[in-house]
Amino acid sequence: MSFKLLEYDVITKEDVMEDASLAEELMSFINTRWNRSWNFVQRKRQAFHGWKLLMTDPSRIYQKEQYIKVYTAVEQLKAFIATFLDEEFSVEFTGREFGDDDKAFKLNQLARYDNKAMKKTQKDYHWLSDIFTY
Amino acid sequence: MVKNVPIYEVVSPEYWVPDLVTDTTEQTAQYHFFEMVTSRFELELVNKSNPDTYFNLEDLQEDTIDDDNGYREQKQDHRLLSSSQNIEDRYRIVNCYITIGHRKYMVTLGNQRSLIIRFEVIEAETKEEKENPYLIPFPINVTHSIPMREDPYGLSLLELIIDKQNAQNRLMNLALIQEQENVFQKFIVDTDIIPNLDLLKAPTDRGHQYIAASSNKSLAGKNITNSIQPINDKMPLDTSKLSLSETIDQLVQSTTGFTDQNRGLQAANQTLGQAQIQQQNSNLLFNLDATMIGLGEEDFWLNIWYRSIKAFFPKTKDKLFRIGSGISGRTFTFNRDDILSSIDPDVTIISKRRKMDEERQMLAQMNAQWPLIQQDPNIPQVSKSIYFRKMLELQ
């Protein structure tokens, strides 16, 4: 690690924009770490693409080995995602304060509103499919 | 309109370049890199709502795809990109979440990691973090199906079942080839009697067909009815293939814990007790995966959602929501005072499905123990009535 980066307690945006040598040190700091991880990632990516192709690429049908596909993997993924995907909420009062129905109703509505506003169900679907695929 | 609420993204794991020396269950990684592909329009859109987020945009160059680009390989594999084609209006940027000294930063680089276009300090939210900034977590959560130590990617479900699927594919293909052979029969033909084989192959949809057979003197004595004979080389359907296929299915089940019943398929005849025991065992098997996924979820809500509420709720005065009914609707406003009160509230918002499952399980247990508790003279009457009330609540 270079020493100029460590001189600062907090590096601000203005420091980076004004001091060109600091910006260069920062980029070399990042690039050494990038290169360390890159070889590993590249091999992993190739493997991922191979598995994805097995599931998605239609051109395989026309290749020499005329393999048909049995989508057991897709079935399993779908079943797992369906198990973990939740859309409904339930508010529970525990501990020191016991809430009433009215408050629980309001909180449920609030949670549902937030859920829709941030499109959480769709994001959960991607989240879960990534967990099981990668 | 400026939005004060942050918007979260689920980024494809293919963009992730992780720290290799890390523990998957803790946030111990020193850095995370995300190689993203974006357009100039999207970058400028961020600058419109939050000015000066991105700088040096005039020096940012379009993506020139070189050989080490995983994105290009992926697109080529999916036949979305030819080998000579370039992507227009695409900018490859790298979002870096890094630790320098005891501070955490977010830096965005462009032009093959040679131009800084964004720089942010990740702020502390809690008291402990303000005292010790090293405790600030990155606003990132990585969740694994099966985490592995010292392997940032861990194991996925697909990795566990892809080899079985491959084997299943080959087996099905072999069985189909064999069946194809069985459909068309072979014949042995005496070409002395029937010299023209094309006549045999001709279709017979135009009335009667006559095939001329030669009857030379030298062939006298040959029986014309034996001139065509089928060859009996049929193989019966190999049942061992079917049993092998079932074995592969069982292998998939044993690795994932998922049975046909879970998938909604018709399983073999079972009693209810057998099915329940089977379900319990499968729960045991993939409980580990569920725990790991649950940990990630917990991190997500605790570290990011709670932190953002803490940071951004004072800026939003109240939230308006509308409840629709058959004809019209009602609107409610919900502000900060509804949550804050003189007594500390302890409210949990949990999944409805999980809560119903827990309640059902608890009720079953309490029902089973109720006769014993009712008859026990050592248990005071108050405890019994509280127990009974809890049972009624759960029903």
Image (tube, rainbow, N blue to C red):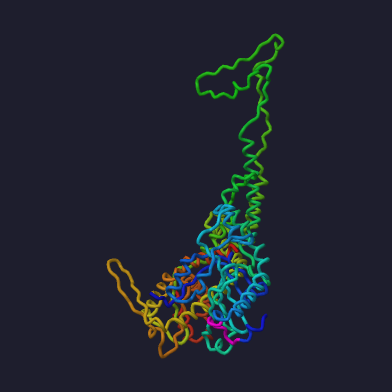
Q: Magenta stretch mostly in which secondary structure?
A: loop
Q: Residue at x 70, y 8 (%)?
A: B217
Hey, which quadrant is residue B254 in on the image? bottom right
- Looking at the image, which is closer to me, A44 or B95? B95
Q: Pick whichever, B326 or B354, lies toward us.
A: B326
Residue at the right extreme, as displayed:
B218
Q: Nearer the viewer, residue B111 or B150?
A: B111
**Does residue A106 lie above or below B382 as drawn?**
above
Magenta residues, as a range?
A: A8-15
Query: How many marks are shown on the rendered structure?
Result: 0
Using the image, determine if residue B269 lies above or below residue B226.
Answer: below
Question: Quadrant where the N terminus of chain A lies?
Answer: bottom right
Residue A69, percent across and down?
Answer: 59, 49
Relative to the observer, which residue lies in front, B170 or B86? B86
The quadrant in which residue B75 appears is: bottom right
In reply to whether residue A10 is colored magenta, the answer given is: yes
Would residue B268 be visible to someone looking at this image?
A: no
Q: Is residue B233 magenta?
A: no
Q: Work out whether A6 lies above or below B244.
A: below
Q: Which residue corresponds to the image point at 66% horizontal and 53% vertical from the top-left?
A: B247
Which quadrant, please, contains the C terminus of chain A? bottom right
Image position, residue B244 (x, y; %): 67, 50
Can you tell which quarter of the image residue B183 is in?
Answer: top right
Relative to B362, B179 lies left or right: right
Say which residue appears at 53% left-offset and 70% top-offset. Answer: B59
Q: In the rendered image, is residue B251 in sight?
A: yes
Q: Point out residue B155 in the picture as x, y percentages from the top left corner.
A: 64, 65
User: Can you name the residue that lies furthest to the left here?
Assistant: B327
Where is residue B339 drawn, in percent x and y? Answer: 41, 84
